[in-house]
Image (spheres, rainbow, N blue to C red):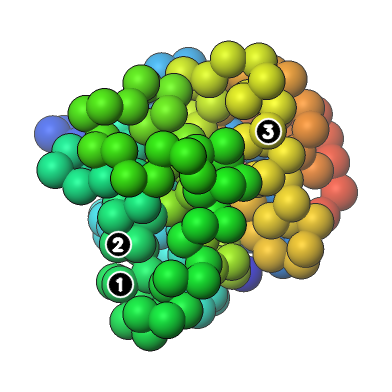
Amino acid sequence: MIELRDVGYRIEGRQVLAGVSLRIEPGQSVALTGPSGSGKSTLLALMAGLIRPDTGSVRLDARRTGIVFQGYGLLSLLTAAENVELAQQAQRVPRAQIARDVPPALEAVGLLARADHLLEELSGGEQQRVAVARALVGGPDVVLADEPTAELDEANRVRVTSLLLDVAASGRILVIATHDPAVAALCSHHFTVSEGRVGLAPPAAGASVQH
């Protein structure tokens, strides 16, 4: 479960989010849409616990969280496989389990043949798919994805979107910030972020938002 209660956050004196209350339950896929700079990335960072709210509270009830960063957050000196391995190393997953989990994660995004290539040898779209594989490896309880399809061609956009939606379909939580209305339409819940506020668009049952 993810729960935000009356959350506010400021950056350099600017109110980015104000009075945001949001509850997301297992099995829900939630799309966050809104103009650039509206606070979508900040909202994901708050959910992940990467930053703390100035006001209100954030609760993340999950054993493991996978994150797709907008800038990918990959290490250029490592291979695709090594970048994916980092996610499990950080969770102290046994090496034998890492060896079993990483190849299927790369295969799912169509990059198993590129596993031993350094990051700098991969295209922007391939790097984005490595970031998705890293977020999904090992089956985390919550996946937070920031524009995970922005650099992808149509075939890989469909592939990655399907993989992400499978997270919610398997009873876990997916939250995705996106500018792609087609991706947002596939999610079970759709929220807009505008002028620091979060609202339902269109109305939907399940996840709730209050002002």
Q: Secondary structure at mark 1?
A: helix
Name which residue type carries label 3.
Answer: Arg
Q: Quadrant of residue 201?
A: top right
Q: Which is more toward the observer, 74 or 68?
A: 74
Marks 2 and 1, how far apart in space?
5 Å
Marks 1 and 3, how far apart in space?
26 Å
Q: Residue at x 67, y 45 (%)?
A: 163
> Which residue in the structure is indicated by mark 1?
89
Total marks drawn? 3
> Which residue in the structure is indicated by mark 2?
86
Name which residue type carries label 1.
Answer: Gln
Image x and y of residue 114, in percent: 41, 38
Q: Secondary structure at mark 2?
A: helix
Marks 2 and 3, how far apart in space?
23 Å
Image x and y of residue 126, in percent: 43, 28
Name which residue type carries label 2.
Answer: Leu
Which of the marked residues, 2 or 3, is nearer the chain's N terminus? 2
Q: Residue at x 63, y 52 (%)?
A: 174
Which of the marked residues, 1 or 3, is nearer the chain's N terminus? 1
> Which residue in the structure is indicated by mark 3?
159
Q: Secondary structure at mark 3?
A: helix
Residue 199 appears in the rendering = no
